[in-house]
Image (cartoon, grey):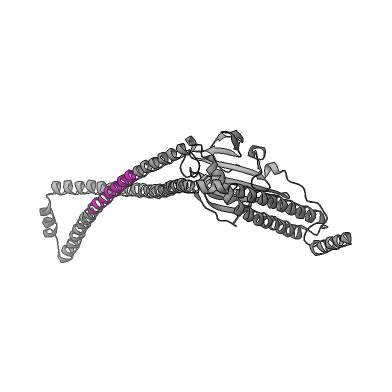
Amino acid sequence: MRNNIFLIGISIIIGTSATFLPLKNIASANSDIEAKKSEIQNKLSSVNSSIQNKKSKIAELEQKQKNVNDQIKQLDTKTTQTNEQIRDRQGEIDEAKERIEILKVEIKEIEARIEERNLLLQDRVRSLQESGGVVNYLDVLLGAQDFGNFVSRVNAVTTIVKADQGILQEHEKDKKLLEQSEAELNSELKELATALTQLESLKEQLNIQIAEKDKVMAKIIDDHENAENELYELEDEEAFLAEQEATIKQEMERQQTIESSQKKTASNVALSTSKPSVDSNNSFIWPAKGTFTSGYGQRWGKLHGGIDIANRAANVPIIASAEGTVIRSYYSSSYGNAVFISHNINGNTYTTVYAHMDSRLVKSGQVVSKGQQIGYMGNTGQSTGKHLHFEIHDGAWKNPINPMTLLP
């Protein structure tokens, strides 16, 4: 009887889904979903058990953990704000430099026009001196042979005088414009100097904040309080696993919809035609540019479940290593500003983690494309230097694998 019911259930699934995906893909996708679902549920049970066993430790360390976390969070918040101010101030400085360059060009053009007129006026003065100056104009007028000739000479003299007046007026106008432009240039230079001073002050402030955080971090390490991080992760993991379960299913359904749409529009080939497989090793890209500083493996008596990429440059972008759906974008006392992304690649589920970022540019539930910027490299959370901590998990979180096996 149970077998009959099972066969009827299979028939219903095949009947309702055959128009969208090949039977093989449906079975594989459903099997993967169920496997991951079962895996996550088992982890939830294990996490719940661990939480109950450590209730006494949580009560004892809760206040101490909160104080340390609050202190680190405040320092991280200040650091992020300072970095944003530095970026804004740098933008203002760049704009001021552009305006200064434009003013310098305008001033050179004005000076060139003034120099040309100076030469012209020098020639006019020299001509007047050689010809007797103003008296020569009178000679011109008095030398008229008749009234018509007199009118012609008057008009000629008037034209010359007006031309000279026009030159002098333009000359005076350009001189005032030059003074104004030079004054504006000096003002821009002063504002630029002020902005540069403020920028240096912000950088000093940032260094002080980083040094303060390093002291806090040193104290945590020296006091061997890594257990606090584990307790925090246990408290947070229960909620995270529930979010992850929903996101993995959402990402699987999104990929199935995309594949179904592609197959409908591609051709009228039979639905059972198999799709060429894609090497998953080529499905991930490096999430940031920088120096590889630490690999996957044991470190400080525990597993370092990812790789570290460091870069001292300003505003280093962090990008999604593959297309997927954001499970969570949040601040963690251990990971700092972190983003978790679920991926479905060739029917396989992966989870990537991007930690210690200065700031985040994506939200939970958001679909991101491969190479899309998701934040800036930073030094937040349990971190002692500016870098990206990057992890790849086979399936759900807490199944870390060496990212180097999947990165090109």
Q: Is residue 314 left or right of residue 100?
A: right
Q: Measuring 17% from the left and 48% from the top, which residue is drawn there? A: 125
Residue 374: horizontal and vertical position, in percent?
A: 55, 50
Q: Quadrant of the N terminus?
A: bottom right
Residue 4: horizontal and vertical position, in percent?
A: 89, 61
Q: Is residue 184 magenta?
A: yes
Q: Nearer the viewer, residue 232 or 105?
A: 232
**Number of numbered discs present?**
0
Q: Which residues are magenta?
A: 175-198
Q: Is residue 292 magenta?
A: no
Q: Is residue 220 left or right of residue 245?
A: left
Residue 187: horizontal and vertical position, in percent?
A: 27, 50
Q: Is residue 248 above or below residue 197?
A: below
Q: Nearer the viewer, residue 128 or 322?
A: 322
Which is the main secondary structure of the residues drawn in magenta?
helix
Q: Nearer the viewer, residue 368 or 105?
A: 368
Q: Is residue 368 visible?
A: no
Q: Nearer the viewer, residue 172 or 153?
A: 172
Q: Quadrant of the C terminus?
A: top right
Q: Is residue 156 left or right of residue 331?
A: left
Looking at the image, the residue that sits furthest to the front is 56
Residue 36: horizontal and vertical position, in percent?
A: 71, 51
Q: Is residue 359 visible?
A: yes
Q: Measuring 41% from the left and 39% from the top, which residue is drawn there? A: 211
